[in-house]
Image (cartoon, helix red, strand yellow):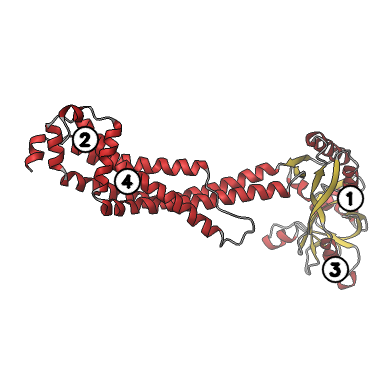
């Protein structure tokens, strides 16, 4: 039995030693209590290590792929700007001649197989048009519709809106040559604007022979460019010159050439991966809650079994806070050890799972944040679920505890 003076002035080290002796006396029960904590922590660490490994892999892959490569896009101010030529072949040559540019790579997109969207021009007048293949039974207000004999020829039937956008009168358009995509098409007819739904939809389009539409859509247009900058040069200076050159070449474009920063893409991807990882980790945290409830139950059992011990210690001078801290330390030690085992097991499982993921060079990563976070959660579970049983033990009446 501990002497009065010793019991009344127990240090933290003494409390921890006493807690360890109590835990050793019930090894099997303690181990079974730990299982819930081990499962919860190991599940969380497994998910986090795979998620962090994936984020690290994405970052390194994009950094190596986009090394000294910078993508430039065009952002139009209005809807019509989406169908204009933002980049031309002469732009590529001009950009390549800029000091500090190693190479230029074009990114092209093909047009739709059913429609062609373009700006049509008649001398200095330009308007937007949606082109599609020949359709029979059009409501023609002047001129004629396309026929089979027009197949393969540069003939076009325009709508009233396009006609008035290029000419003073609708009738003035017949027989005139309008241009788009570098080709001249003869206007042979103009459709009538209608309030009928089906006719109204048809009146929104301009019509060319089917083969001509295929030919127009077979060519790719440059949607953006990748500029490779020589590492010896200042990238900001070089890229500013590139954008300035593009602006000078396309002064009539309503919009802005912008640099697409790869670091933003990396940040977005890592944020998405992090959100998914956190969500899955939160689900696995249910196991931790179950483990915490198990710790609480075992602590209640321990307090009930050791009522006599608690009563005697209180009778010889142990303060309530001494009893409280002893039982609290027991709970924290159980969850802490379970947490350490869970962290090790979780990293092993994460590494094992990563070997089955068909991504070359991918591996699970155990970060300091995950390590410290998991250890802290383990201790916190011990404190939260151990405080109530420990508090009950500290408030026991010594006389009643001894004789129960």
Q: Nearer the viewer, residue 344 or 251?
A: 344
Earlier in the chain: of badge 2 and badge 4, it is 2
Q: Quadrant of residue 212?
A: bottom right
Earlier in the chain: of badge 3 and badge 4, it is 3
Pointer 2: what residue? 323
Q: Nearer the viewer, residue 245 or 348?
A: 348
Earlier in the chain: of badge 2 and badge 3, it is 3
Pointer 4: what residue? 334
What is the crowding at mark 2: few (fewer than 14 residues within 10 Å), some, or many (at least 20)? Answer: many
* Image vertical order of residue 144 relative to residue 193, above or below: below
Q: Quadrant of residue 13?
A: top left
Q: Nearer the viewer, residue 307 or 126?
A: 307
Pointer 1: what residue? 89
The quadrant of the picture occupied by the C terminus is top left
Pointer 3: what residue? 211
Circles 2 and 4, Cβ within 8 Å, touching? The answer is no
Q: Is residue 278 visible?
A: yes
Earlier in the chain: of badge 1 and badge 2, it is 1
Number of the front mark, 3 or 4: 4
Count of numbered tags: 4
Number of the front mark, 4 or 1: 4
Tell me the CA gap for discs 1 and 3: 25 Å
Q: Position of residue 348 (x, y in %)?
A: 49, 55
Tell me the CA gap for discs 2 and 3: 91 Å
């Amino acid at each position: 039995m501990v002497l009065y003076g010793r019991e009344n002035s127990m240090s933290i080290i003494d409390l921890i030693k006493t807690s360890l002796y109590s835990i050793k006396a019930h090894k099997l029960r303690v181990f079974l209590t730990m299982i819930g904590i081990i499962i919860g922590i190991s599940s969380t660490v497994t998910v986090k290590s795979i998620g962090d490994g994936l984020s690290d892999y994405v970052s390194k892959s994009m950094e190596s792929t986009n090394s000294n490569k910078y993508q430039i896009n065009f952002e139009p101010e209005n809807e019509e700007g989406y169908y204009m030529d933002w980049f031309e072949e002469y732009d590529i040559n001009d950009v390549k001649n800029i000091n500090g540019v190693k190479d230029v790579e074009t990114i092209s997109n093909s047009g739709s197989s059913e429609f062609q969207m373009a700006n049509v021009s008649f001398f200095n007048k330009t308007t937007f048009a949606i082109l599609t293949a020949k359709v029979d039974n059009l409501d023609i207000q002047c001129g004629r519709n396309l026929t089979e004999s027009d197949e393969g020829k540069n003939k076009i039937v325009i709508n009233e809106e396009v006609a008035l956008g290029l000419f003073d009168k609708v009738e003035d358009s017949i027989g005139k040559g309008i241009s788009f995509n570098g080709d001249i098409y003869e206007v042979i007819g103009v459709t009538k604007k209608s309030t009928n739904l089906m006719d109204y939809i048809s009146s929104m389009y301009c019509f060319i022979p089917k083969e001509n539409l295929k030919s127009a859509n077979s060519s790719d247009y440059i949607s953006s460019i990748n500029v490779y900058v020589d590492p010896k040069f200042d990238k900001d200076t070089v890229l500013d010159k590139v954008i300035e050159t593009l602006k000078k070449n396309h002064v009539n474009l309503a919009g802005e050439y912008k640099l697409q920063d790869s670091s933003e893409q990396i940040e977005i991807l890592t944020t998405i991966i992090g959100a998914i990882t956190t969500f899955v980790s939160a689900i696995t945290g249910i196991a931790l809650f179950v483990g915490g409830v198990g710790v609480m139950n075992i602590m209640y059992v321990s307090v009930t079994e050791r009522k006599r011990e608690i009563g005697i210690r209180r009778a010889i001078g142990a303060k309530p806070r001494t009893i409280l801290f002893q039982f609290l330390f027991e709970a924290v030690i159980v969850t802490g050890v379970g947490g350490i085992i869970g962290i090790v097991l979780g990293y092993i499982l994460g590494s094992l799972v990563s070997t089955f993921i068909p991504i070359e060079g991918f591996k699970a990563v155990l970060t300091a944040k995950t390590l410290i976070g998991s250890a802290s959660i383990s201790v916190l579970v011990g404190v939260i679920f151990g405080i109530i049983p420990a508090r009950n033990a500290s408030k026991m009446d010594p006389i009643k505890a001894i004789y129960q």
